[in-house]
């Protein structure tokens, strides 16, 4: 009984230490990056608007399910929709730089932006 209690207590203490490290080190570090990025994007948005926003059509096209593209989930799809990107064709017409401007710090999670854009171009051709 004493060994089981010690084992469970060790697991709980280890979990608590891991949670504290995550909370005080990683989350704070991420929040600092987020604030720095927000300052950078606001200064960039005042300087020069994103070219894709200017060329956005007045009528919203019938949206495609952008989550079909490997690497795009609900969060990235929402950010693309907020920027006026609703179809595979619109996504395929973007450059890597435009994609980085639209997605911001979410782009860090993507492994290969060019592959993502190529998948969108291929899907647009198949339609």
Image (tube, rainbow, N blue to C red):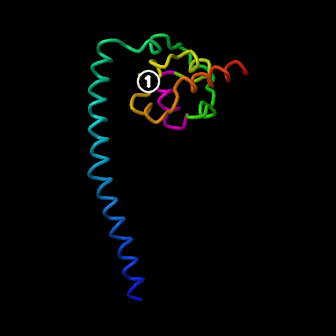
Q: Quadrant of the N terminus?
A: bottom left
What residue is at 52 percent from the left and 13 percent from the top?
58
User: Which corner quadrant of the image does residue 28 belong to?
Assistant: top left
Measuring from the top left, give residue 13's x and y in whole percent: 32, 69
Viewer-nearest residue: 23 or 2: 2
Q: Residues in magenta?
A: 72-84
Query: What's the residue at 51%, 33% (across, down)?
Result: 111
Q: Decide whether residue 78 is among the magenta residues.
A: yes
Q: Quadrant of the C terminus?
A: top right
Quadrant position of residue 125: top right
Residue 38: percent from left, percent from top = 30, 29
Instruction: Please give the residue where the numbered disc 1 appears in the rendered image.
Output: 100
Above-or-below relation of 55 to 30: above
Q: Secondary structure at mark 1?
A: helix
In the image, 105 versus 60, the foreground residue is: 105
- Residue closest to the far right: 126
Q: Residues within 10 Å of mark 1 (few under 14, many from 20)?
A: some
Residue 71 lies within the magenta run: no
């Amino acid at each position: 009984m004493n060994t089981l209690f010690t084992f469970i207590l060790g697991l709980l203490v280890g979990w608590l230490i891991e949670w504290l490290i995550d909370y005080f080190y990683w989350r704070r570090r991420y929040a600092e990056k987020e604030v720095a990025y927000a300052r950078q994007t606001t200064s960039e948005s005042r300087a020069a608007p994103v070219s894709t926003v200017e060329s956005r059509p007045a009528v919203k096209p019938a949206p495609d399910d952008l989550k079909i593209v490997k690497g795009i989930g609900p969060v990235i799809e929402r950010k693309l929709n907020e920027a006026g990107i609703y179809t595979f064709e619109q996504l395929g017409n973007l450059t890597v730089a435009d994609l980085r401007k639209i997605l911001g710090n979410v782009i860090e999670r993507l492994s290969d932006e060019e592959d993502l854009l190529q998948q969108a171009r291929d899907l647009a051709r198949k339609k």
